[in-house]
């Protein structure tokens, strides 16, 4: 009962937060239009477009504290909300990977007018299993796909990063398939945080 009451209270607050942050950053990333178009992807387990609150994204960034030499790769970047928050940090580069063409196009348009940008932005319309992760030092994964794609992505990350033994941090939000990480012992869970809203974030770091 209390959970239902909390949800009713938090909904208008989140709505207002979404509008105000978008206005402040001069972008349009809000998701109130029931955008349910789904491109299944190579592994057939893509999830529908979901938007995390600006505060959730900012909290995740605060957990890892990006540095000037970090290249951030955002998977399931949608209209670009997490990409833009990272790009407002002093990092080397931010890359968004989005499988739905229309959403990737909107992210590109948003990126051109982003206020407060401190890093270059690149949006790629492609399947996450085909992406190149060799540049990435921070990988942000907001549960955009299922177990099969996650496993394939982690295998690609392992091939591109483990070879050079480069520093790597993975942010996994709403970690529905966290058990997959158990099959990658070179990744160590360093933080496991659940916000008051119930959103859980796990941070993994490479260990060699």
Image: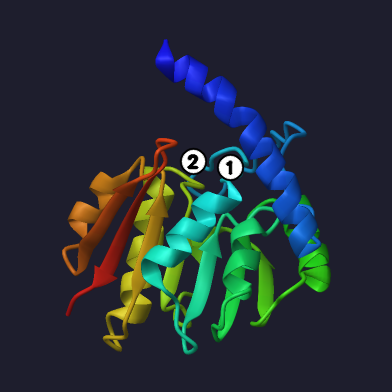
Quarter occupied by residue 185: bottom left
> Percent from the top left, x then y, of residue 36?
69, 33
Tag shown at residue 205: none
The residue where tag 1 is placed is 40
Residue 143 visible to an observer of this rendering: yes
Question: Farthest residue in the top direction?
Answer: 1
Q: Distance of mark 2 from mark 1, alpha carbons?
A: 6 Å
Q: Position of residue 159 (x, y in %)?
A: 33, 76
* Front-lying residue, 111 or 160: 111
In the image, taking residue 29 as reference, residue 76 lies left or right, namely: left
Residue at image x 71%, y 37%? 37
Tell me if label 2 and label 1 are in contact, CB under 8 Å. yes
Q: Is residue 141 above or below residue 174?
A: below
**Residue at point 52%, 23% (across, down):** 7
Q: Is residue 101 among the parts visible in the rendering?
A: no
Q: Residue at x 44, y 36 (%)?
A: 197
């Amino acid at each position: 009962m209390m959970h239902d009451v909390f949800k009713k209270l938090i909904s208008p607050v989140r709505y207002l937060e979404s509008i105000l942050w978008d206005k402040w950053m001069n972008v349009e990333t809000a998701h109130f239009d029931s955008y349910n178009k789904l491109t299944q992807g190579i592994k057939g387990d893509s999830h529908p477009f979901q938007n995390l609150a600006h505060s959730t994204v900012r909290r995740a960034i605060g957990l890892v504290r990006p540095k000037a030499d970090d290249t951030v790769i955002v998977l399931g970047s949608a209209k670009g909300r997490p990409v833009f928050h990272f790009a407002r940090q002093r990092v080397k580069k931010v890359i968004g990977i989005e499988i739905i063409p229309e959403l990737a196009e909107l992210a590109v348009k948003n990126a051109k007018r982003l206020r407060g940008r401190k890093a270059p932005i690149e949006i790629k319309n492609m399947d996450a299993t085909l992406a190149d992760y060799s540049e990435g030092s921070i990988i942000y994964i907001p549960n955009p796909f299922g177990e099969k794609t996650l496993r394939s992505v982690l295998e690609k990350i392992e091939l591109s990063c483990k070879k050079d033994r480069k520093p790597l941090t993975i942010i996994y939000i709403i970690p529905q398939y966290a058990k997959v990480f158990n099959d990658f012992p070179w990744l160590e869970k360093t933080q496991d945080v659940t916000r008051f809203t119930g959103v859980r974030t796990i941070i993994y770091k490479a260990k060699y």
